[in-house]
Amino acid sequence: MKIDSRFLPRPEAELRITMTLDGEPITTQVGDTVAAAVLAHSGDAFRSAGQDTPRAAYCMMGVCFECLLEIDGRANMQGCMTHARDGMVIRRQNGLRKLNGDTDD
């Protein structure tokens, strides 16, 4: 569900790129980060943590790890530290993230 963004609109840039977020096409400007693009698109949560707690980008400088997304098939990518590129496939993550050494047992 698309909601109004909490951010003021910027002047339209000549260079726009298109990505998909959970299968839905979104556009952003060249130079934006993935986190900025997702926030500007909907303002919805980026992921859910334990007990379905919604989480979204907070610090926008790579410290808090609240902006974790699956980007181009790689889980736990920091959206605020990843520059948006044309054709990226972005998915929200649900549940606790896996750490190195985790097993399904």
Image (cartoon, grey):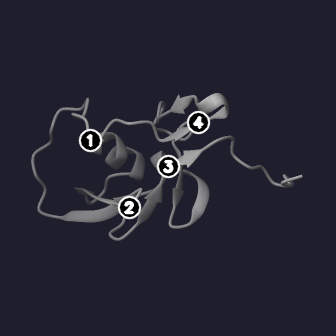
Identify the residue position indicated by label 1 in the image: 2
First in sequence: mark 4 or mark 1? 1
Per the model, the C-alpha gap separating discs 1 and 3 is 15 Å
**x, y percent for residue 102:** 84, 52
Q: Residue at x 28, y 45 (%)?
A: 41
Q: Answer whether labels 1 and 3 touch (C-beta < 8 Å).
A: no
Say what secondary structure mark 3 lies in: loop
Task: Name the quarter where the N terminus is drawn.
Answer: top left
Q: Residues within 10 Å of mark 2 (few under 14, many from 20)?
A: few
Seen at 62% across and 35% down, the residue is 49
**Image x and y of residue 54, in percent:** 52, 31
Number of the label disc, if any, that sits on residue 63: 4
Task: Give the residue displayed 34% in from the left and 40% down from the top.
Answer: 39
Q: Nearer the viewer, mark 3 or mark 4?
A: 3
Describe the element under mark 1 as helix, strand or loop: loop
Q: What is the spatial separation of the Cα atoms under label 3 and label 4, in whole angstroms?
A: 19 Å
Q: Name the residue under label 3.
A: 92
* Image position of 23 (left or right of 103): left
Which dot, 2 or 4, sits closer to the camera? 2
Local SS, label 4:
loop
Query: Which corner quadrant of the image does residue 95 belong to?
Result: top right
> Pointer 3: residues within 10 angstroms few (<14), some, or many (20+)?
some
Q: Name the residue under label 2.
A: 23
Which residue is at the far bottom?
A: 87
